[in-house]
Image (cartoon, rainbow, N blue to C red):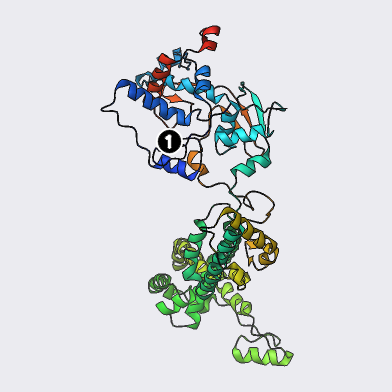
Amino acid sequence: MVALKYRHYDSLLRGRLTTDNDLNHIFNYYKYTPDRTNNSTIFQQLFASKRNLRSYHGEHITEKQFKNNWVPNLHAVSKLSSKTDTTTNKIDIASQTFETPYQMQAVAFLEKRLDVAIYRALLAPSVRVARTIILSKGVTVNDVYIRDPNYKLKPNDFVKCDPEKVVRYMGHERPLINESLRVDALQVAEWNEELKNLRDDPSGYFPQFKFKIDGLYERDPKRVFFEKLFAESKRASQKAVYELRKNNNDATIVAKIFKVLKNETPSVEAFTKEFLNDSKLGEELFAWYNKFLSKLSVEKYTPEAPTKSDEVKLTPEGVSENLSKKGETETPNETIVQDEYRTIAANVLADSENADVRTLKNNLSSFKEKYFRAIEKDAKVNDVNLDWIKTLKENEELPEDFVHQSYEGLEKDDIESKEEELKEKENELAKHINLPWQQGHLWGRKNPELEYFTPWKPKPFLGCLAVAPFHIEVNFRTCQFIYLRDPISRPGHSEIISPYGLQEHKNAYLYYKARVNNRNYNRKGAQ
């Protein structure tokens, strides 16, 4: 026998705290305040505590069943004193004493029930749904099908739930076709607007776009799709920065410095132009020039000019003349020009006897770190995910069938008839959806034959009441768990999960202690 849902089960006015994860019950947790007991008699206080506890602990069973299983004998675990405790002089463990919540053990017999254990293992959104899974032959205990929700688990029992049923009841409800059309129309309009903004101003709009993506559910198809793109873009950016840092070593920096010294009049603007247009780097290099770089002779470290007739002249006229002879139209190879300055840099760094060169080497270390930070900053500014933005496409305009028609005020039969009409056109309408993360199906109806949201996503607000139990070891991938032992209490802690404090449990215990005559307990005797 199971207790019927009383008429105030979903009442927002009474605000009972239950094991249900429905929106109304979550709101009751939000607005809960303890009962006022200033002007209440002792009996009223005890009865109020009993009423509150029964709304959460064993709401799905009758009061008679609860009393027949309630045991007044309470068990707890207390820490034993040992020689190591008495000889410990660094930390005085015994100086802090905590009360053992014995009275919370009064409802421990409910935690042994199979339906409650499935709920505690987070494989069902409520105890009543766990009972439904058991009755539908979806649970085995030690490889034996059990169809009794009142089955008492023993330590080390192995429980397995049907994954299909767990996904069905823990998943979000499948939306109506009319609701899917409304959401898809909003998605397409929003996506086309977002893509337009990304193409017009990538660097300016991207932070706002990423903020929207981060606000979605972690397994939302849109978030999964774009996080993959973000990760690939980040890896490409990091690889590009690594290559830049690798190529810009001491010799490269010195080569750029001597390129300015040889071809231009040394100034802050000349150094700034050569080093990523960073004014701070340009000012620092110009300060070096005033101190010691001006003393270094460029001609001293310049290699001798090529004398062979077939060498390419490193002048605009010579390069043009050489290319015209070969019939080519390519631009001069910059690496040939850069090799000249790399040779100069190598000669400079090899001159360890020069005091100004040694000063240059000592300053290169700190300058190189600043230059690398400027390179990374410049790479982030110039690579604002332009590559993956170009691969995205807009969704075509949707037909008039996607215009939302509200079902408000319609009877259930009228709603079903309209859904049947839309169901015949569902496949045709789904072809118009071509979003990057959703293609060829309506929102939440990737597999319309299933009764839950597809691709699967959990029911809302499941995390509000998700508490990992101490006495159960769960494997969520296989929907299995092991009932390790019965929940216990110890000083300062109880393994009984309850939204109420110890005082409520004390009052409820006193209420049942005076009124329950447990024949089973009296027959077996105190254990």
Location of residue 40 with respect to 460 vertically, above or below: above
- Closest to the observer, 243 or 47: 47
Q: Is residue 38 left or right of residue 308?
A: left
Q: Which residue is mark 1?
A: 16
Location of residue 466 with respect to 497 vertically, above or below: below
Disc 1 element: loop
- Where in the figure is residue 71, as x and y percent of width and height? 49, 15
Q: Which residue is painted at 61% across and 82% down in the image? A: 305
- Where in the figure is residue 208, as x and y percent of width and height? 47, 64
- Closest to the observer, 231 or 468: 468
Location of residue 145 with respect to 249 vertically, above or below: above
Q: Quadrant of the N terminus?
A: top right
Identify which amino acid the numbered label 1 is placed on. Answer: Arg
Q: Which residue is painted at 63% across and 78% down in the image? A: 336
- Where in the figure is residue 10, as x and y percent of width and height? 46, 40
Farthest residue toward the right? 326
- Where in the figure is residue 502, as x and y percent of width and height? 39, 25
- Closest to the observer, 363 or 65: 65
Where on the picture, by quarter, is residue 242? bottom right
Where on the picture, by quarter, is residue 424? bottom right
* Res 90 visible: no
Where on the picture, by quarter, is residue 506? top left
Q: Is residue 134 left or right of residue 292?
A: right
